Amino acid sequence: MMFRKWLTAVFTCLMFMSTAKAQLVIEITSGADQLLPIAIVPFGYEGVDALPEDIAQIVENDLARSGLFQPIPRANMLSMPSVEKDVFYRDWRLLKSDYVVIGTVEKLPNEKYRIGFELLNVLGQKPVQKHASIDIGPQNFRDAAHYISDKVYELLTGTKGAFSTRILYVTAEGDRAAPQFKLQVADADGHRPQVVVESKEPILSPSWSRDGRDIAYVMFRNRRPNIFIQKLATGERQQIAQFRGLNGAPAWSPDGKKLALVLSKDNNPEIYTLEIATQKLERMTNHYSIDTEPSWEPDGKGIVFTSDRGGNPQIYRLDVNSKRVERVTFEGDLNTRASMTPDGRYLVTVQKNDGNYHIALQDMKTGRVQILTETYLDESPSIAPNGSMVMYATTYKGKGILAVVSVDGLVKYRLPSADGDVREPSWSPYFK
Amino acid sequence: MSVNKLGKFAVIGLSAAWIVGCASSATDTDSSTVSEDATSEEVVEDTAENSDQAFGAGDDGSLTSVIVEDAAEEAVDKMASLVGVETVFYFDFDKSIVRPESREALAKHAEYLVLNPEARIVLEGHADERGTREYNMALGERRAKAISRYLTIQGVAASQIETVSFGEEVPVAFGHEDSAWQLNRRVEVRYE
């Protein structure tokens, strides 16, 4: 009986391996020392039709990628239970697994599937998360898996998981002298990419609205940069800035009402805010130097931005009400493209030291600065909505790729793409 | 009378351009590969549909053709004084100072623009791949504005010039080393 189940699991697992095709493949380059051992047992399934995805495998990949967990390899598992009554806790103690995730997939009559799962504490010999289930369509297997990963992550770390979030990024494909630019949206693990905009002219600076429904980006048209906002679901698009000179770096305010952006219509690059409903434009900086790359603080009271008013580019903070400006970064030859973690504790920048560009993290309380990356030509850092990870663009083997580093600098992985350059990642907020 | 004057000027301009062309390729190692095939004028029709094609020939870092929106015979004749004149100007890292070797060619463009007040140019500024993209957009614009100032000082009306930045988005050289970066830090003069 158990053997049959096991066989089914192996068989279905093989099926997924051959059919699963990822645009971006996760490659973990280094990890934290203290990893929590966890077993994610292939989910039990009594049906005959092949399933679209292997949920347990996706959960395993999610948890491994977080850099906090050490999944037990399937080959080592002594049994593959799918309900708690079949679990022999001593089997898992032998494998030194602290936790076990088990679950079931059941085909419902209406082309839907019921996904059941529970999280068990091996030492305590009891569930941390009692049996719960969700009903999904065949196209939502990955969503269900990421939902389970989020649950497990939150129960065991106390931090909300960000596995159900998405990323925006730009690819440049084909002839390098005349590439095809594509703005794409994908799951945070790089799966299920979809092209949102495609153009022969450059696309850059994608940015999410705070509810994740709208995006803003810069796209050239007739050799001039313009800012667009677009509804992700419908593709409905609106051109919002088409001034002479620069139209760049759009960033949504936390309340979703305004965009911070950069215009040089009054001669040199300045930070402006645009109230989307009224189209009211307000100039926020006034300096003959370059002011660019605005990013809102989580409470919306301040905007951090890049300016070379002190000679070389550094990060400054603009108080939105008083428009008072103060310098924030002092270490490194230069700092650019700043953003703040959701708790307001850390500032992430691109810092240059001895000719190398790396992602840096500055503690806003202590002022302490830590260099997080050691890759080449690092840029465009974007912070996960739970503040745990930073995705950024880097150059690897002569190609633009995306990479991720944890805010403690211990976990690093890259997302190599099949073709072309990948750049400008933007991590979505939580979807409501 | 005025036509005659313009003709004379064009001949002087043409020979000056030859001299400048030879002189610069002999002394400036950075742009020697660029100036090699910069002796003939190409006329490219620039429409919205094929706007990217203007960069298609830039494999070796050369993009030296004068681009004319309306390829009428008359326009070609008028632009004879610009035959062979450099249209790409290079910059130092993180700098937007017009190099001394750019001055003669820029003077030729200024002369042409002063004599033809109806002529319009777009100065397209570019940066190398190092640093962040939006900062490089600002840097590209600063370089285009430096060229613009150089031209207005010589009498070109500000209304004849538009500055646009492409930041690091449209490189002409694709390596990740100094020689490629040098070719990408540039301003291109494009006649509308």
Image (cartoon, rainbow, N blue to C red):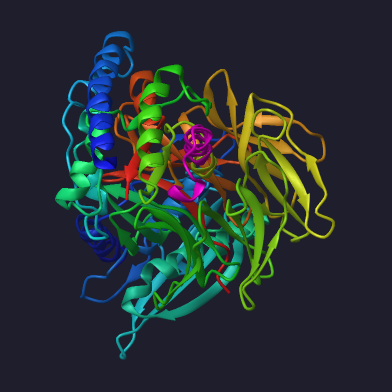
B142 in magenta: yes
Q: Is residue A245 visible?
A: yes
**Viewed as shown, does residue A185 lie left or right of B6?**
right
Q: x and y percent of residue B169 in the render?
A: 38, 43
Residue positioned 19% across, 37% down in the render:
B57
Q: x and y percent of residue A371 in the render?
A: 61, 29
The residue segment tinted magenta is B139-161
- Residue A51 vs A38, above or below: the answer is below
Quadrant containing the N terminus of chain A is: bottom left
In-front residue for pair A297/A341? A297
Q: x and y percent of residue A111 in the render?
A: 29, 86
| Furthest residue in direction top, as rendered | B27
- Residue A301 vs B163, above or below: the answer is below
Quadrant containing the C terminus of chain A is: bottom right
In-front residue for pair A391/B43? B43
Query: Residue A221 sits in which quadrant?
Result: bottom left
In-front residue for pair A120/A66? A66
